[in-house]
Image (tube, rainbow, N blue to C red):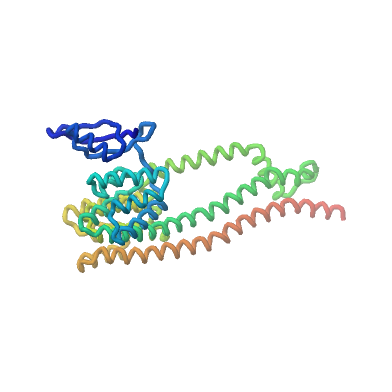
Amino acid sequence: MPVFKYKGYNSEGRRHSGTLEADSVSEALRLLKLKDIYPEKVIHENKTGFTFSITSDAGALKTLTAHLAVLVSSGVAIVDAVDTLSERRGGKLRSMLVSIKERLRAGASLSRAMEDYPKFFPDFYISMINAGETGGCLDSVLNELADFLESRDEMDSAVKSAAIYPAIMLTVGTLVLTFVFVFVVPKLVKIFEDSDKALPLATVILITMSNLLKNYLWALIVGIICLSYAVKRYIKSHALRVGEILTKIPVLNSLYVSRFLKTTGSLLKNGVPMLKTLRLSSKTVGNAFYEKQILEAERAVSEGLSLSLALSDFPPIVKEIISTGERTGALSEMLLKTSLTYEKEFKAGTKRALSALEPIIVLLMGFIVGFIVFAVLLPVFELNQLIK
């Protein structure tokens, strides 16, 4: 029988927590009421005894939201919509949807039911759902979220493409060159090593590099691993400094700003309060420097300062647009429109960077291969001259 972990209080206001066995969430709620316990949270536990959770998958969340938006917009009750979606899923995702359905049937709101799965539903997502339920416009909020997640997925795909393509080229090129230096070059230059004639500098360098890679390849691998670890530690311990440096790169700055504008605009448009909006949007920027600036802006706004003045380190054009939106009362609309402009800048910048990087990598590999050929053939040419 499934095990549920609960937290709540009794009629006297005393806190209670523990576990109980029940066939479903609704049955667990009924048993708790019999014990005079008013639950605040009831979470399903898996067989190992840990709280059941499902890790967020951007693709799964986007698809789920889009399907839920279609069903709710068509007039299907939210309970029936979740039930329909649960029948078409499997594994942990199905278990999560079944649990949410049971919570809905027991009287919980959709946002409250989603709070049991924070690893799958982000904070801003739950806040927008809650705002939609409060304002009676859950269908439009779900459509907004579906569009938002689709746009974010496109941006994330662009980021991955920009990172993966050169990484693959560099990795393949490095492996091929390593193979050439370790296995091919030693056989080609072996005839020159036994020669009494002085070898050209290029050939000496090639032989030295080949011997180093052949004899100390393990040391190079260990060094790369240690360097990667050191870089990660440095980035983690100096996140603010690294974040500030990254904002100086135009294409990355466009990405960070677009994320902030789109999240902030979407949250404000759906009725989420300004202070909560800033707190939630700070987590979606992906840059520690900007995150700190947004949280500082939250404190400044709570003290009465306008948002345009509070965001001191954001681009001037962004602050001017926010100022205009504050004066005209159309802040959320202007933020969303501006986010599209920065998205286009990011995609165009990424395309230009990839177009420039590809020939650079090809030229680098060509230079190395050309050096190997030159270093191998130069002694041959000199030998032919001596024979003549």
Q: Is residue 316 above or below residue 133?
A: below
Q: Which residue lies at the image location 42% right of the left edge and 53% below the top edge? A: 59
Side of 115 relative to 385 (left or right):
left
In percent of width and height, residue 201 lies at 70, 49
Marker count (numbered): 0
Q: Which residue lies at the image location 30% right of the left edge and 32% below the top edge? A: 21
Side of 261 relative to 225 (left or right):
left
Tell me which corner region of the image, top left, top right, bottom left or bottom right, holds residue 5. Answer: top left
Q: Can residue 257 be seen in this view?
A: no
Q: Outermost residue toward the right?
A: 388
In percent of width and height, residue 242 lies at 39, 49
Instruction: Using the image as rendered, state which of residue 209 and residue 184 is in the foreground.
Output: 184
Q: Outermost residue toward the left?
A: 12
Image quadrant containing the C terminus: bottom right
In percent of width and height, residue 234 lies at 42, 42
Image quadrant containing the N terminus: top left
Tell me which corner region of the image, top left, top right, bottom left or bottom right, holds residue 306. Answer: bottom left
Q: Which residue lies at the image location 79% right of the left edge and 52% below the top edge? A: 380
Q: Which residue lies at the image location 39% right of the left edge and 55% below the top edge? A: 63
Instruction: Using the image as rendered, state which of residue 384 and residue 84 is in the foreground.
Output: 84
In percent of width and height, residue 75 lies at 28, 60
Side of 378 relative to 365 (left or right):
right
Instruction: Using the image as rendered, state which of residue 217 and residue 197 is in the foreground.
Output: 217
Instruction: Using the image as rendered, state which of residue 219 and residue 149 is in the foreground.
Output: 149
Q: Can residue 315 be seen in this view?
A: yes
Tell me which corner region of the image, top left, top right, bottom left or bottom right, holds residue 305. Answer: bottom left
